[in-house]
Amino acid sequence: MNRGEPPIGREYPSTGAGRLPGGHPTGARPGARPLPGRRLPGAVALARLGARAAPRGARLIAQAPRTGSLADLGSRKRTLLVSYRRDGTPVPTPVWAAPAGGALYVRSERGSGKVKRLRGDARVLIAPCTARGRPLGGPLEATAAVLGPEEEPLAERILAARYGFGRALFEHAMDLMRVDMCYLKLTPGPWR
């Protein structure tokens, strides 16, 4: 541990978020002890396979009329998140997203392709979809942001309330493997 950094598991009164050596937050999941940069084993290969296997509709959603609504997204368990590569190529990814306060919250690997793409271009399209990513409605324009540690507990509560036991098991597995995770906030609204 470097001088001046808090020990593992220390609670901050203002945020409730613990910190790991190096200042990486444990966030809203007190049992999580992520290793900075740790990815799910095989994550890159699985993501590439998933992108190739995505239904044609998922790849064409970027061309669809922007007729979606937050109510449509709230009525389905999965959301298709379309982020953009530097060259403008849309990349669809089905995610668990929970609506609250006019926004959607998502948890993802910090080193995932979508998070890297969002750092370069915060514009996203979101649409209700199946578990495999087949769109079930029109897309909605939104802006994405990676949340800071002070906002993570709220995002975790919203996601946990919506998805219950199945998500709890998945997230517990991520915690045990010490995968470096983050939360995203997707705010619907026209792009600027």
Image (cartoon, helix red, strand yellow):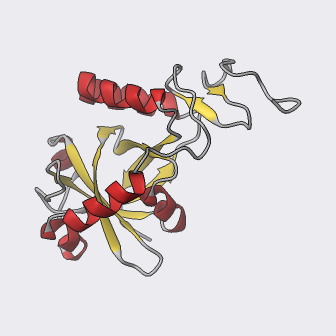
Task: Name the residue furthest left.
Answer: 136
Q: Quadrant of residue 104?
A: top left
Q: Residue at x 66, y 18 (%)?
A: 11
Left or right position of 38 against 8? left
Q: Residue at x 33, y 63 (%)?
A: 48
Left or right position of 38 against 11? left
Q: Quadrant of residue 17?
A: top right
Task: Name the residue furthest right.
Answer: 3
Left or right position of 157 against 180? left
Locate the N terminus and report the quarter of the image it occupies: top right
Across and down, in percent, residue 58 comes to: 19, 65
Q: Is residue 140 above or below residue 10?
A: below
Q: Is residue 188 above or below residue 177?
A: below
Q: Quadrant of residue 40?
A: top left
Locate the C terminus and report the quarter of the image it occupies: bottom left
Q: Observer-nearest residue: 124 or 54?
A: 54
Q: Is residue 182 visible?
A: yes
Q: Residue at x 50, y 42 (%)?
A: 182
Q: Observer-nearest residue: 100 or 168?
A: 168
Left or right position of 20 against 69? right
Q: Observer-nearest residue: 16 or 114?
A: 114
Q: Residue at x 38, y 41 (%)?
A: 105
Across and down, in percent, residue 24 comes to: 66, 37
Across and down, in percent, residue 159 comes to: 34, 32
Q: Is residue 70 visible?
A: no
Q: Is residue 120 above or below residue 78?
A: below
Across and down, in percent, residue 163 comes to: 25, 29
